[in-house]
Image: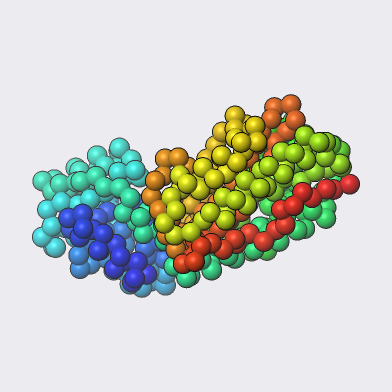
Amino acid sequence: MEKRLMRLRRLMEERGIEALLISHPVNRRYLTGFTGSSGWVVVTRKEQILITDFRYRGQVKDQAPHFEFVEHQGNPFADVKQILDRSGVRAIAFEENHLTFSQHRKLAESLGSLQTVPSSDLVERLRLIKDEEEIQRIRDAVAVSDGAFERILKEMRPGMTERDISLRLEFLMREAGAESSSFDMIIASGPRSALPHGVASDRVLETGDLVTMDFGAYYQGYCSDMTRTVMLGSPSERQREIYGIVLEAQKRAIQAIKPGISGKEVDATARDYIRDHGYGEAFGHSTGHGLGMELHEGPTLSYRNERGLEPGMVVTVEPGIYLPDVGGVRIEDNVLVTDEGYEVLTKSPKELIQID
Ligand code: GLY
Ligand code: MN
Ligand code: MN
């Protein structure tokens, strides 16, 4: 935590920020370790303070020993003002993407003549590069979803519904220690597999279906996010063809990953391959996204990201082909950017699995 604070202060200094108010719960947890659902963090050049209420008295001391604890009496912004007054700071930056309009109004009222300044991408910038502890937690989250996938393969069969699969996966992940799913899982079978984000329905699985399962574990504050598409019965020629194309595109995109390559170039690796095989129109989303405490965070693997990847980043690689009359295929792994290139964290097999 001390290292994270040091990196934050360096960034604040670069941007001429003397005091920062952090309101985003994930950023708060990242910086402090505090897992409570309510709290405000103020970081100045010399001090770091966590403002919350009496419910969290003991918890703050345990989880955030490096932070001064201030217990507010209903208006945390009154305490923010006191902190600024005693440090002689005249302006505080706030997270413009997270503070609500009404919270900002109350903050400004409480601060009187002190200024508020919008800021963005400070703690998020730090979170792009995962430290050892974070990488371990992501590995653990990935192992939980890999384990659930291995089990569901043994259990799934025609006659089950998409919801049956989703409930079972949820149970298996929680049994293995997950706090929850990392998002509302997608189980899309048969024609529904052509819906990139078809959440589990009551549809009954049938022989001849492609079944896309996109799910992940939320484990010790970190997410995993994997997709596998399996075949019930024998694939048609078209189903086999699109599976092969997505798999090759996904492998090529992963192999392209190394420090310095841009998100745009990784995206183009998968996209060009799919387009060159005639299915460019059927791949309408980006190739991947950063993954960590949030399911979707920086860096994005899309045409919009021209910045180079760096060691310590964790991304998903998840191209797909979606054909309304045939079904869809998506394959998604979680990948760590290393000094030399990449490491695929997801261990589940990805050759076409056929379930009879
Ligand atoms: N299902 C969300 C994702 O894979 O990004
Ligand atoms: Mn996913
Ligand atoms: Mn994803």
- Badge count: 0
Give the quadrant of residue 219.
bottom right
Q: Nearer the viewer, residue 227 or 219?
A: 227
Q: Height in image: 169 above or below 86? A: above
The residue shown at (19%, 42%) is 109
Q: Height in image: 147 above or below 294? A: below
**Residue most toward the right?**
356
The residue shown at (67%, 47%) is 247
Give the quadrant of residue 255.
bottom right
- 305 to the left or right of 321: left
- 196 to the left or right of 85: right
Report x, y in % for residue 239. Answer: 77, 37
Coloring applied to the structure? rainbow
The residue shown at (13%, 62%) is 86
- 239 to the left or right of 336: right
Can the viewer see residue 331 in this picture? no
**Residue most toward the top?**
325
Can the viewer see residue 244 in this picture? yes
Q: Nearer the viewer, residue 320 or 5?
A: 320
The residue shown at (24%, 44%) is 118
Report x, y in % for residue 331. Answer: 65, 47
Report x, y in % for residue 63. Answer: 42, 69
Q: Nearer the viewer, residue 31 or 328?
A: 328
On-image quarter of the N terminus: bottom left
Report x, y in % for residue 312. Answer: 45, 63
